[in-house]
Image (spheres, coloured by chain):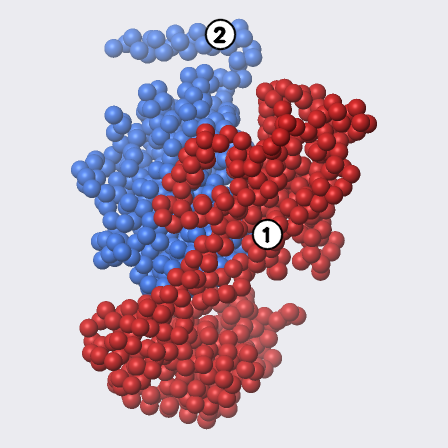
Amino acid sequence: MTTALYRLLFALLLCFQWSSSYAGDAADFSAANSSKQAKLLQAWAAAPDAARLPLLESLQNGRVEADSNKTPFYKTDTGYQAAEGGDLEPVGKLRKLRLNNRLRGLIAITMASHQLFSTDPAVRLLAAQELQKSAKPAQLQLLNERLAQEDDADVSEALSLALASLQLIDSDPQVRLAAVRLLGETGQPLARVRLERLLADSNETDAAVRTAAETSLAQVKRRLMIGELLGQAFSGMSLGSILLLAALGLAITFGLLGVINMAHGEMLMLGAYSTYMVQVMFQRFAPEAIALYPLVALPVAFFVTAAIGMALERTVIRHLYGRPLETLLATWGISLILIQLVRVLFGAQNVEVANPYWLSGGIQVLPNLVLPYNRIVIIAFALFVVVLTWLLLNKTRLGLNVRAVTQNRNMAACCGVPTGRVDMLAFGLGSGIAGLGGVALSQIGNVGPDLGQSYIIDSFLVVVLGGVGQLAGSVTAAFGLGIANKILEPQIGAVLGKILILALIILFIQKRPQGLFALKGRVID
Amino acid sequence: MKRRPFLKTTLAASALLLSGLFPFSAHAADTIKVGILHSLSGTMAISETSLKDMALMTIDEINAKGGVLGKQLEPVVVDPASNWPLFAEKGRQLLTQDKVAVTFGCWTSVSRKSVLPVYEELNGLLFYPVQYEGEELSPNVFYTGAAPNQQAIPAVEYLMSEDGGSAKRFFLLGTDYVYPRTTNKILRAFLHSKGVADKDIEEVYTPFGHSDYQTIVANIKKFSAGGKTAVISTVNGDSNVPFYKELANQGIEATDVPVIAFSVGEEELRGIDTKPLVGQLAAWNYFESVENPVNEDFVKKWKAYAKAKNLPGADKAVTNDPMEATYVGINMWAQAVEKAGTTDVDKVRDAMAGQTFAAPSGFTLTMDKTNHHLHKPVMIGEIQDNGQFDVVWQTDSPIRAQPWSPYIEGNDKKPDYAVKSE
């Protein structure tokens, strides 16, 4: 059976080598129905041909269109070009060739097997890695041939791995043994499944292969375990950094100034909308530099929210110092006004904030661990904002004044600190930092009028748990909550996890009302 | 025997007399009041606002053609503010104070369950335009959205087919409330009937507004290593944005693990950059991209209306499935009133049975003779990079709804016609 298949493939190969122009492929493909197209792709994957690359590339980029005679055309930047060469003009309306997910997957495999012939080792390596995931038994012959001719060490290794998963069903126990050992070296989730299947099926009778497979499986499982643990730690850090960014502004307005600021969430929201506005401006006036818009959005969001915060402090909040209940109601009212204002200006719909290319995708650290770029950047950014805030509060004159006013307002006023101005600036600073948080949030979640509502509770939790008036407390609390949440979530689910965390915090606050870190000494009143 | 007509004529005469006395109410007598019960604020405003606008557009259109029974329709818009008990209160207000002839409204199942007793008690008439989980058949409601067998089950059948990728394992992900839980219960029973074992089905729920999908996406990845996997998402509202972003960032592509969504349409995609989502699926009974003259006209009208009324985001106005269902529902009701010759609820209900309407989906939809649901075509669409869907599969003809899913135990004894809930 298999020999017959090889013969057929060989004949096909000969056939392709014999005819110098491969005129039929694109036309065949565009005329076929989807199951025929799948068969074509499978045949092409087993018998690659360099002349077919333009077709495959165009298919992958969705640039193949067919006219009403089903004659295929490539869409180029300037116009259309007949896929079969020549200067044919399209007849009737051109329509994009419809692909479904199955065909897209097959195109990727076929593309990879064509790229194995590339002169660039890097391209060959990528192709071999793709085939590790998806190689089909029909490609065994091809992979063997390429491996024999491969001179680059890395590509050889990748190819033999791709082969290994196909060789598990080889009739020769020696080949199977080698394949099993090779699979043990990878930490691939697929290798685990394949080995498990090999062991589960009672058809693996060779004792040596069985023991080797068992050791390999244990090895693979250990590697997967490490990847999983690292992944959990990273998602905990990432959630923590988001909580931190959301809560940091509140740590100043509530923590230092003692204002129960229910409009804090709306400062986050305004920061996110500033990001959106900057993005729109870039799209309109500088589309070539669009990738840089988040960097420009940072100062814009900071100053916009800081200005709004200062205006609120001067007009409303300063009249309410020392009356926490009224402050709570007033700021809550302000938050409703801001939400409705945004709804009127931008609509109730969420607005689209796209990630620039350097914030999309992720880096593959282990076979089962991808770290998304946007999360890495946000963790770094959260730490940067913490350091910046710390420097501002501890190394500048403004920071000195803020601390003086929080600790003893009357004494500070006696020493000539303009307490009104300091209050205003500190509130502006807190709001501005919330604005920065908003920029970061816009890169991972929704930007809509209700954005702030979903973060306000979490922000208060972080600040209260961390200890009012302490920056270090907020940082510890944010990361602690993030990691605890991510440890609990896979065990008991997202809904129960959230409830349990809340219950734990309530218990903790009962036991220690001042939070994790408390200001000590007589300055606190 | 003769008392009733007599009463009626005296009432009508006194009404005439009264309207003569009070010229302000004269106008009201010439119109038929139509209630619109959609949240215009709160979490559901995102989805429901456009349904309110679509209802107003359809009413304008009917009025421009001369109205119903020679009278103009007068919309009464109320805002239940995404607050479920408030739906019941506003519904009662529409029926008792405004005396509307019919109401178009609700999105979430929980809001419909909240108004249902009011409409049954006062014998009102409600048109519900959204796909839902079934398990309900009230004489006072007409369901113009899809029942599970018109959306969820064909979608899973597609995923199991060769073109859909021959999925063997299923990850059921949903928001934690009645619709996803019931739908997943039906799907689990359906998958069992197709020979899928419990170890190949994973069911996960998140709270409303959940925004951190790292762990769940990592779990999907782990789960998918065990065989060809498809994700069936009943995630509702804007949680979908962080979910899809996380999928893309962790490198899960539609070719490896397709995600089919039951609550993601054109309107929801407006807030997302769809480039990383190309190839992900959604199942509905209508897509804006469907090509036929009725739909072309429908989309053009909607865009013109959005621009004329200066709706927010009018330059990017899109239509979606529940909007189409609203449009069909109002038009069918108008036809039924013309046929019955009155707006009386019992007579209109009888006249609704068997009504047909050439819908934008490209099919002539029929209201079932007994079960208050539309016969609808099922379509599976793939997300494109422009935020639209490309239909990859559809049924040849409209399918009759099964509000009582045969995959839930005990449903075979339920009658296939409307009875008041106890």
> Which residue is at a point 42% across and 88% down the rendered structure image?
A145
The reply to the same-chain question for discs 1 and 2 is: no
- The quarter of the picture where residue B144 lies is top left
Given residues B342 and A514, the one toward you in this image is A514
Mark 2 belongs to which amino acid? Leu
**Residue B176: % across, % down:** 38, 40
Between A19 and B206, the one lying in front of the other is B206
- The residue lying toward the viewer, choosing from A1 and A361, is A361
| Rendering quarter of residue A321 | top right
Q: Are marks 1 and 2 in contact (CB under 8 Å)?
A: no
- Residue A169 placement: quadrant: bottom left
Subunit under mark 2:
B
What tint does the image give chain A?
A: red
The answer for which chain carries disc 1 is: A
Which quadrant is home to the N terminus of chain A? bottom left
For the point 41% across and 34% down, the residue is A503
Mark number, residue A378: 1
